[in-house]
Image (cartoon, rainbow, N blue to C red):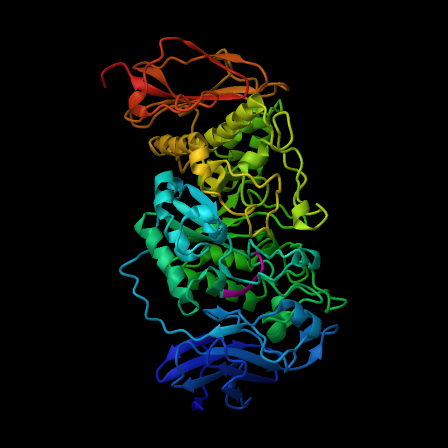
Amino acid sequence: MYPVRPGRRYPPGASVVDHGINFSIYSRHATGATLLLYADAAAKTPFQVIALDPEVNHTFFSWHVQVVGLPPGTRYTWRMQGPHDPVGHGWLFDGDVELVDPWARAVDTRRWDRARRCREGAQAHDSIRGIVLADDYDWEGDQLLRMPSQEMIIYELHVGGFTRHPSAGVAHPGSFLGLVEKIPYLRSLGVTHVELLPVMAFDEQDVPEPVGAAGLSNFWGYSTHSFFAPHPGYCVDPERQRDEFRDLVKALHRAGIGVLLDVVFNHTAEGGQGGPLINFKGIGNETFYMLDAADRSRYLDFTGCGNTVNANHPFMARFIIDCLEYWVREMHVDGFRFDLASAMARDENGVPMHHPPVLWGIELSDVLAGSKIIAEAWDAAGLYHVGSFPGYRWMEWNGRYRDDLRRAVRGDGGLIDQVATRIAGSSDLYQGNLRHPINSINFITCHDGFTLLDLVSCDKKANAPNHEGNRDGCAHNLSWNCGAEGPCNSPAILALRRRQAKNFMAVLFLSQGIPMLNAGDELLRSAACNNNTWCQDNALGWIDWSLAERNADMLRFVRGMIALRKRHPSLRRRQFLSHREIEWFGPEGEAPDWNAEDARELAFTLHGRGGEEPPLHAVFNFGAGACTFVLPTLPGWSWAVAARTWARSPQDLVERSDQRPLSRSRVGVPAHGVLVLEGIRTDGG
């Protein structure tokens, strides 16, 4: 038995102190606490059970104890005693249930059985367990990336799905270390940041019964239970969980690539009524969750996942900000994307707040001052905050950009005003409240919805493999199958789909704001028209790396558009463009008729900065017929083709060194085509 001392309430969690480990856990209404220590993952019973003395080990709302000489690697859980009053107060204390510490820096999930916990309640020693860690990691001088926001090109990927396919050819598929092996590919693509789908420890078993019965799991990971811990399923060595994540961050930083985490603070893996006690419910259900005022056993649900975190409770807000600051300080993460962030703008009764304390706390945190802070600016209950998140740091997934460009590129008429506004940085959303193009995260596709290839191949979702009756996933996809649904053998349709995919990529990288690319879109990955592969830890959700050879032309095109963006500073402006810096044209060189109901043609000239950057001219024909465009005349410059989406590779993308001046003043662009021209000096400058 290890000797014990009173310990201290701060910091929460298990932390190394002189002569041992200090344990501390918050619980406002608990009347008692018991710490259970396990030797290792295989241990079925604890080697020491420590009942905390309320007179010695309790300060304010915290329970704490120091265990002298306890070694790293020890597993631990808590049992919390207290009142049980679900309806009146929302209290769910159960002194028989072992809980994982919400502040655990690493967790062991190998004994966890969610279905049994939900079905039978307390079971002896079946909990997720925290792991005591020593902190002796050598960062070797690693620093946060601190890249200016306008230089960012984000690549959204799933750690497991990125390397789990046999074609990935990595030593450790589906892991942090497997992703390290793919860093040369990321560098060759030209992206500056990876945005990792949830990597905080989540419950893979959190699925509806029909989904689980089909052998499917919570693949995407939007079911967090331990916000300070890396997901153990992405780790090779259970004893090096935190260090393996740090190895990934360090390797990415060495390659000049920043790390953004998709974080899920709007709900947790404990679900609603009938969901298991994992941690928060058992230590402070009434603090951590929004509960129905009339019946506090019922959870308010603005997330579609059974519960909603009470993010603006002072303690929960502090928990969230402490967690973010930990991942920045101790894990060297460069920023965060907040899933369903609008849910975090609600008070404890679910009412939207004008000044949500947690969102402002994140905005004003000194530790997060250099971090990229990105909101998915809506929730599952109707709040939509695109363009209105607080402060200056908050960027937003621009859902208006996605929707307007999807409609325009598929051929809807009368949208040239919206297209121009989105390409120019969405001033209608951001300029009025002193924000800038860099507050807009532009995207066509993301993990949630069709892949790029499916966007141009599928009019309807086909989610039957999810075993939810095809009810899941969004039905409003704004897609176009180009003439046939799903896979087809028509050369004409296949060519049009490829052209449309290139059109989307061309527009994305020609737009002001921060572009985000969904991993695998550059390879034309398909999910067979499934627009919600959240439970598909299989070929539907994985990247097939053989596509890099089969669709080499698409990969080359995307790389080329990224390179073009990087050599044009005018495409990466922090401030909105003036009328002198960008000019818009109709097909005959006239000013566009912004109110034309059937217009599908548009062009712009982007003037270079400082006389050294060449001008850029882009022509968009989203209509079903060919169109001729007049080229503007710029003294000292002629135009050369940089990209044309309808041409076969390699004519679709012309390297800068191979560009030749055009001798004509008009150019023809076929139906559903995008043409990009770069200026070549004619005055010898």
Q: Is residue 220 above or below residue 605?
A: below
Q: In the orientation shown, which residue stands out farthest toward the top?
A: 664
Residue at 51% x, 35% y is 426
Q: Which residues are magenta?
A: 222-227
Percent of width and height locating residue 578: 43, 28
Q: Is 217 left or right of 154, judged from the image as shown?
A: right
Residue furthest toward the right?
A: 294
Magenta span: chief secondary structure: strand
Closer-to-camera residue (448/412): 448
Q: Residue at x 70, y 71 (%)?
A: 119
What residue lies at 37% left-to-right and 60% top-to-bottom?
Answer: 246
Relative to 270, 297 lies left or right: right
Closer to the camera, 46 or 442?
46
x, y percent for residue 610:
29, 27
Q: Could you say where residue 319 lies in the image, as x and y percent from the top left?
A: 51, 66
**Residue 2 visible to an observer of this rendering:** yes
Quarter of the figure with residue 470: top right
Apparent side of residue 272 relative to residue 176 in the rendered image (left or right): right
Task: Name the foreground residue: 318 vs 201.
Answer: 201
Q: Residue furthest left?
A: 684
Q: Position of residue 37 (x, y in %)?
A: 49, 82
